[in-house]
Amino acid sequence: MKKLKRITALIGVIALFALYIYTLVLAIIGSEQTMNLFMTAVVATVVLPVLLWTYSFIYKLLKNNYSEEAREKTEELKRAQENEDDNCDE
């Protein structure tokens, strides 16, 4: 999980950095889209980290839920196998 968080954070930082660089280059060139890209960068500064956190949170919930189900099924299989072994011994 720690590795996934680091990778996700790195992707977010790279995406924001690229967006800021792109906006800066267009501002220097004097493009008509500079203000729109600046507003996009400002919104992305808030939205992108929130989305990345949400994805990692959902992943953690799903992983924990799956782990519990897997443990329960493993215990059921062990009990069933023990019952079969007890029945074969008799």
Image (spheres, grey):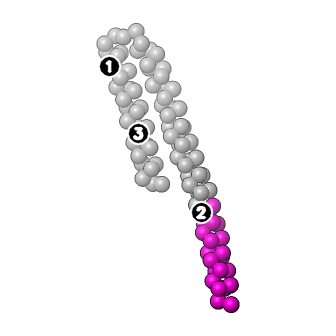
Precedes in sequence: disc 1 or disc 2: 1
Of marks 1 and 3, which one's residue comes earlier in the chain? 3
90 over 68 or under it: above or below: below
The amino acid marked with disc number 2 is Ala
Question: Which residue has dot 1 on it?
Answer: 25
In the image, 22 versus 59, the foreground residue is 59
**First in sequence: mark 2 or mark 3?**
3
* Residue at mark 3: 11
Tell me: 8 left or right of 72: left
Q: CA distance from mark 1 to mark 3?
A: 21 Å
Crowding around mark 1 (Cα neighbors within 10 Å: few <14, some 14 to 19, many 20+) is few
**SS for callout 2:** helix
Q: Residue at x 67, y 80 (%)?
A: 83
Q: Residue at x 65, y 76 (%)?
A: 79
Q: Which label sits on residue 70?
A: 2
Magenta stretch: helix, strand or loop mostly: helix
- State the residue at coordinates (35%, 16%): 26
Checking the image for residue 89, the label placed there is: none
Mark 3: which secondary structure? Answer: helix
Q: Is residue 70 magenta?
A: yes
Q: CA distance from mark 1 to mark 2?
A: 51 Å
Name above or below for residue 88 compared with residue 33. Answer: below
Residue 74 in the magenta stretch? The answer is yes
Q: Position of residue 57 (x, y in %)?
A: 56, 47
What type is the residue that disc 3 sits on? Answer: Ile
Q: Which residues are magenta?
A: 69-90
Marks 2 and 3, Cα distance to the nearest angstrom?
Answer: 31 Å
